[in-house]
Image: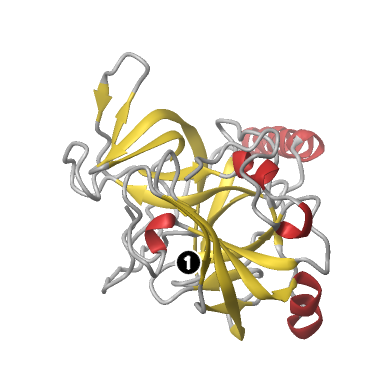
Amino acid sequence: MNKPLIGAFFAALLLGAGITPAVAAESAQAQESATETATETATETAPAVKAVTFAGTVALSNCSGSVVRSPDSQPTDPALVLSNGHCLETGFPGPGEVLVDRPSTRTFTLLNASGAGVGTLKASKIAYGTMTDTDLSLYELTSTYEQIETSYGIKALELETAHPVAGTAITVASGYWKRTYSCDIDGFVHQLKEGRWTWKDSVRYTPECQTIGGTSGSPVIDDVTGKVVAVNNTGNESGQECTDNNPCEVDENGEVTVREGINYAQQTYNMVPCIGTGNKIDLDREGCGLPKP
């Protein structure tokens, strides 16, 4: 897991720029013309990319998270905060353990677009939490979406209702570190095993997303739609097989693959049908894909 933070250091990356030697003027002009044409074509056909900011993300004491809503959530509904099951203040839920409607007074620092803390949000309960099949927690807040927007001018992030697609450009936005990680969805993992836990249909990132401790619970945002498609949760740190902080991939035939340095997230589309009227979690609703107690 991108374990709850107990201390971490990271270095800045320096990027170099290459310079191509000059060529004959005629060739350069031809190349420039071709480049302009290609750029214009790409601009016309490529979908518009929304700028991903920190607005709506939150910092927990040990992890990251975000204020989220389903497409049917109402302004007067109590807001929800999404994070990881392994970020719960009650400790890691055991395999098969599901928490529903547990009282909580946990607080969250709400961030604006630039990553500055603008206020403190408070939970009334752990609406849902588990590390079985997925790794997520949902907190119900004492504030409504309307109250948060009125007080801070910040809207909740919307949850995507469809299964994400490989090749999608994504951003992992960490409220804890106030740092973003950009890459693509590389593919999906039949079973992701880490220590005692097994997660299903996990999102695998391309190598550019080098998430670290404290990024656990960060929303994974589709760069085009701006919607949340997954919640960041783990990565293989040292190449070990299926141990804590070193998840392994298991395919449909039971073949195990270890990808050192690769990080993962848990999809969130399957929890959207579980969010009912008034933002109450109803595990019996049609289409709800979350495990029951």
User: Does 74 sit above or below residue 111?
Assistant: above
Residue 27 image position (x, y, % from top left): 63, 33
User: Does 92 sit above or below residue 57?
Assistant: above
Does the rendering let one see residue 106?
A: yes
Q: In screen coordinates, is 49 left or right of 84?
A: right
Q: In screen coordinates, is 98 left or right of 143?
A: left
Place residue 9 in its image quadrant.
bottom left
Front residue of this view, candidates 183 and 101: 101
Q: Name the residue carrying label 1.
A: 64
Residue in the picture at 73% in, 36% down: 42
User: Does 210 sit above or below residue 61?
Assistant: above
Tag 1, which secondary structure? strand
Residue in the picture at 33% in, 65% down: 4
Q: In screen coordinates, is 152 left or right of 192?
A: right
Residue 137 image position (x, y, % from top left): 50, 57
Place residue 88 in its image quadrant.
bottom left
Q: In screen coordinates, is 293 left or right of 241?
A: right
Q: Residues within 10 Å of mark 1 (few under 14, many from 20)?
A: many
Residue 282 image position (x, y, % from top left): 65, 48
The coloring applied to the image is secondary structure
Front residue of this view, candidates 101 and 33: 101
Front residue of this view, candidates 28 and 48: 48
Does the rendering let one see residue 18?
A: no
Q: Exactly how many numbered labels are in the figure?
A: 1
Q: In the rendered structure, which amino acid carries the disc numbered 1?
A: Ser
Residue in the picture at 27% in, 71% down: 8
Residue 117 image position (x, y, % from top left): 58, 83
